[in-house]
Image (cartoon, grey):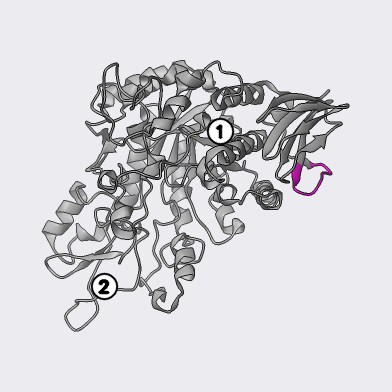
């Protein structure tokens, strides 16, 4: 189907270079029909909220047909909507309305693996060893006298072996859950299939793709052992996170795939883009995913992983900006997502964690490049740490005891009782329960309240959109002299200078000479000709 809508500002092919993208975890954003699960119609109903928040685009987590073993990242049909989320007609209506509101739509693409319920995989199981059907996946004979041992020592990201044996004795590879068999990306049918999937959604009007496990699609020839048995626990964790050179991550051949995808994206109007979820051993290797003949962006997770200190953030920012200059692509900044603990909790939880999270948001939004927000961070939501084990649905929890469900609890919209307006009036269902403290953090509770986290985000995003020093063509930052434990940098357009100051020092600091405050994460105190910036706080100041 060819979309009847045109993306907003269709001639602005560079929109993604400085966009603020809001990640929608579809299952937990808004429930239109009261069944306890978020859906596409729920997103459609809440588009005015996202427009007024001030974001430029939405990234939707997978909504495709799926058994939902891994929250939709186990795809059974890449060209249809799972009934729990709606229909293709619902998607078309949602994207039409999004474009009318000036919002672009980025959809998640999951190319490393399919669901075990995908028709290709069921055909592979039925066809037997050596068949063309099995060639689309990574089947192998086992080791040992009777093939009773896995083909190699690879381990799943979700814990346990990365191989599962089937009834006829062969094993299949799954870097994640056994319900997510890895595809063989050296097979021409696999490559052709996903090129067609790209066109299917581009024809429906999507503005971009977030590529899941973008570094994992090619495995080293011969499937060599890693040598996990000789590693310490810490070494194994580093390898499994993709920060070491594994034979199934960041292989050079993966770049051939993206060089084939880029002409497809470029053939559509309006600046269609793709961003890689890629882990690499060095910033230099990560930069290889970006460029005029590959993908437009790659997530920089070093910013998310930075510790709460001026030195840590300064190092990450300098490295990211330097690499962006080399490849001529924008940096990406992210503080939270659906796979990581919310940054309010990472930064200390409670009052301290929220104070630091608010400051980090101003730091991020003042930097050049593209910022990705995770739903609910604009409300200051913390991680939900005390979910009952029987309600957790993350497949990693069953294998490792660690769960990502705490950052996936449906966000609060309004009301006195859970689930706080997640569904229609009177609905009490929610696939994960929200805690009582979220009543005070709902959209309604914070709207129009001076100093609330929601109003802080709205103000910062409004300034970011209109301020000349934060414009797309203002690429660099100028670091300013500052006290130990304080970060200060400026961005300049003509005679207008915007300076961001962040206080990590543990004591209030006096800031002077940067002009008038535009927005601050905490209340400032006038002192002489300057302002006293509280601990764990940030401020934007303007001098013209």
Identify the residue shown where x is 41% and y is 73%.
Answer: 226
Residue closer to the observer: 99 or 39: 39
**From mark 1 to mark 2, how far is it between C-alphas?**
43 Å
Q: Which mark is residue 16?
A: 1
| Horizontal side of residue 494 vs 437, given as left or right | right
On the image, the x and y values in percent for residue 542 come to 78, 26
Residue closer to the observer: 138 or 131: 138
Residue wearing tag 2 = 150
Instruction: Decide if residue 5 is in sight here.
Output: no
Residue closer to the observer: 85 or 390: 390
Report if residue 482 lies within the magenta region: yes
Disc 1 residue crowd, few under 14, some 14–19, many 20+, Cα 10 Å: many
Extreme-bottom residue of the structure: 145
The quadrant in which residue 449 appears is top right
Q: Tell me the SS state at disc 1.
A: helix
Q: Which mark is residue 423?
A: none
Which region of the structure is painted magenta? 479-487
Question: In this rendering, which labeled residue sits more in front, label 1 or label 2?
Answer: 2
Identify the residue shown where x is 24% and y is 78%.
Answer: 143
Q: Tell me the SS state at disc 2.
A: loop
On the image, the x and y values in percent for residue 500 come to 73, 35
Point out the image quarter for the N terminus: top left
Instruction: Decide if residue 312 is in sight here.
Output: yes
């Amino acid at each position: 189907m060819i979309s009847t809508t045109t993306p907003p500002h269709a001639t602005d092919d560079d929109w993604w270079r400085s966009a603020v993208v809001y990640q929608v975890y579809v299952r937990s954003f808004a429930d239109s029909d009261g069944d306890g699960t978020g859906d596409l119609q729920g997103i459609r109903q809440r588009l005015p909220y996202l427009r007024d928040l001030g974001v430029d685009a939405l990234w939707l987590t997978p909504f495709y047909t799926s058994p939902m073993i891994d929250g939709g990242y186990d795809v059974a049909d890449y060209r249809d909507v799972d009934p729990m989320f709606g229909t293709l007609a619902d998607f078309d209506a949602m994207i039409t309305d999004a474009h009318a509101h000036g919002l672009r739509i980025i959809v998640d693409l999951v190319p490393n693996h399919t669901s075990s319920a995908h028709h290709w995989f069921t055909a592979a199981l039925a066809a037997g060893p050596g068949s063309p059907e099995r060639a689309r996946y990574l089947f192998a004979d086992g080791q040992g006298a009777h093939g009773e041992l896995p083909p190699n020592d690879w381990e799943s990201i979700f814990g346990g072996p990365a191989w599962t044996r089937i009834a006829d004795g062969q094993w299949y590879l799954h870097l994640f859950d056994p319900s997510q068999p890895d595809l063989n990306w050296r097979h021409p049918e696999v490559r052709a299939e996903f090129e067609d999937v790209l066109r299917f959604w581009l024809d429906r009007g999507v503005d971009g793709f977030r590529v899941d496990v973008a570094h994992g699609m090619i495995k080293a020839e011969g499937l060599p052992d890693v040598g996990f048995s000789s590693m310490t626990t810490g070494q194994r964790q580093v390898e499994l996170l993709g920060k070491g050179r594994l034979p199934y991550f960041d292989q050079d051949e993966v770049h051939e795939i993206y060089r084939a995808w880029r002409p497809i994206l470029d053939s559509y109007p309006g600046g269609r883009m793709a961003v890689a979820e890629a882990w690499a051993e060095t910033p230099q290797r990560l930069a290889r995913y970006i460029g005029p003949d590959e993908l437009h962006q790659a997530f920089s997770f070093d910013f998310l992983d930075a510790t709460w200190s001026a030195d840590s953030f300064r190092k990450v920012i300098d490295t990211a900006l330097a690499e962006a200059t080399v490849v001529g692509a924008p940096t990406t900044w992210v503080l939270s997502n659906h796979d990581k603990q919310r940054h309010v909790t990472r930064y200390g939880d409670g009052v301290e964690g929220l104070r630091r999270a608010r400051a980090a948001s101003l730091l991020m939004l003042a930097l050049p490049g593209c910022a990705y927000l995770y739903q609910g961070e604009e409300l200051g939501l913390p991680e939900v740490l005390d979910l009952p084990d029987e309600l957790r649905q993350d497949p990693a929890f069953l294998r490792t005891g660690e769960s990502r469900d705490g950052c996936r609890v449906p966000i609060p919209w309004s009301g006195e009782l859970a689930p706080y307006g997640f569904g229609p009036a009177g609905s009490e269902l929610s696939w994960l329960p929200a805690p009582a403290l979220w009543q005070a953090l709902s959209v309604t509770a914070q709207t129009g309240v001076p100093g609330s986290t929601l109003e802080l985000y709205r103000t910062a995003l409004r300034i970011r959109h209109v301020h000349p020093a934060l414009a797309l063509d203002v690429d660099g930052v100028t670091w300013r002299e500052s006290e130990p434990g304080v970060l200060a940098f400026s961005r300049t357009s003509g005679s207008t200078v915007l300076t961001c100051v962040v206080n990590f020092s543990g004591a209030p600091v006096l800031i002077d000479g940067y002009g008038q405050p535009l927005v601050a994460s905490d209340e400032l105190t006038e002192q002489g000709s300057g302002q006293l910036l509280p601990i764990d706080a940030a401020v934007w100041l303007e001098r013209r």
